[in-house]
Amino acid sequence: MKKVQPKRYRLDVSAQFYPIISTKKSQSLFRLSAVMEREVDRETLRLAAEDVLRRFVTFKVRLRRGYAWYYFEENDAPVRIFEPTGRLLRPIDTKETGGYLFRISCGGKVIGFEVFHAVCDGMAALEFLKALVWRYAQLSGAPVTGHEGVIDIDASPTEEEAEDAFYRYYRPIRFGDVDLKGLMGELPLLLPGTIAEEGYGGTYRTVAAAEIASKAAGMGASFTSFMCGVLACAIERMSGGKRPVVVMVPVNLRGMFPSATMRNFVNFVRLTFRPDECATAGDYVRSATEQLKAKATKEEMEKFFATTVRTERSFILRIAPLWLKILGARIGRFFLKSRQTIIFSNLGRVRIPKECGLERVLFNLNVSKRAKVNIGAATVGEETTVAFTRSVTEKAVEEEFGKVMGELGIEMRPIEVC
């Protein structure tokens, strides 16, 4: 009997470079955690993960090497549920995970989902986590009837969910129409700090979502531009104003270019705040709002990812063998400088039936020796949880951020995550 070959998937345009620049010690990982109302049962969670993974076909893969690029291959290995180690964003060892490029853990009331960015972006990962929580609640006997806000895991996967949406919406663009200098940006302020030897750290604060919404609306700002403005103000106060503060903001492209893809479909906007350009927190918020409105447009986003697609399709990259790309990337790491001070990413409001017992979602972004602190936010019910992930021992960013928020009349409450 002829052996059936595993299905293969081409990495999406955004994902192509993640495995090339990654090493065993440095991977582009991020983490979503579901904090539940009750303690999590490991075996029930494993059964839920097996059920959900059949729906997310581009997660059910292992990474393989091709001649010019990496590719994904269908993976039928059983899913493992790991004990929490207390080490945030520990590199994924695919020998431990059965080839999977993600790691699910549980301990106490927390379900952790750490994933390699080549698989998906934050919004797609959130869809997976919600489905996992929904199925877990159902198997646990919770009175979950509908699945509002959650993908139907009993439905068949669609082709659109596995599509590379960058290619779907790609329109040819001349390199002369691209502001390459603007895409790279100027050298920003880099946060100081002592690199923690024991690994990355995370601290978490909650805030009433209505408080932020009200204050932001009063300033004519969105949630994201308000938070970015406050963050830039806090960092400027810490820095002494030697270089510009650059806040990178991921923009979910699914709102501008409709797609149900469960892969990467995100671009970044760079918000630049030059020394002494703003005097008050309100000035920073207004600047962030103006910059987001100008830069996060459909036209600008299309130019940005069209450049990425065209670069990937260039003749040189198409014929260059994978080993040469990897060598070039590793040499380049010594010369490339970080182009942002900090990243702020907002997943928005998490929609899931209340009966699932989800209390909050934590969103930890990747950090490094250069990008020392990054921030993720997610809202469940009436509370927004802000997660500060850092590679340094100092907590100066979150402390100063909390002070500026306090000056604006918004209380941020620290929480412990067990």
Image (cartoon, rainbow, N blue to C red):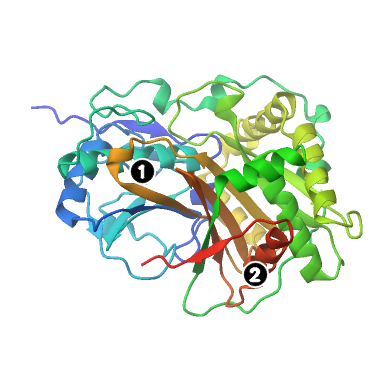
> Which residue appears at 31% of the width and 37% of the height?
131
Q: Secondary structure beneath disc 2?
A: helix
Residue at image mark 2: 399
Quarter occupied by the C terminus: bottom left
Mark nearest the camera among 1 and 2 is 2
Between residue 384 and residue 53, name the one nearer to us. Answer: 384
Residue 408 shows up from this direction: yes
Between residue 8 and residue 359, name the one nearer to us. Answer: 359
| Position of residue 121 measured from the top left corner of the image (x, y, whole percent) | 49, 41
The image quarter in which residue 58 lies: top left
The image quarter in which residue 362 lies: bottom left
Residue 129 numbered tag: 1
Q: Secondary structure beneath disc 1?
A: helix
Please tell me how crowded label 1 is: few (under 14), some (14-19), or many (20+) other residues with Cα within 10 Å.
many
Residue type, label 1: Leu
| Position of residue 151 measured from the top left corner of the image (x, y, whole percent) | 34, 29
> Which residue appears at 48% of the width and 73% of the height?
199
Q: Earlier in the sequence, mark 1 or mark 2?
A: 1
Between residue 117 and residue 410, name the one nearer to us. Answer: 410
| Position of residue 156 measured from the top left corner of the image (x, y, whole percent) | 27, 22
Q: Residue furthest left?
A: 1
Seen in the picture, residue 34 relative to 295 is either above or below; the reply is below
Q: Residue furthest right?
A: 276
Residue type, label 2: Glu
Residue 74 shows up from this direction: no
> Which residue appears at 24% of the width and 58% of the height?
39
| Position of residue 284 measured from the top left corner of the image (x, y, whole percent) | 81, 51
Quarter occupied by the N terminus: top left
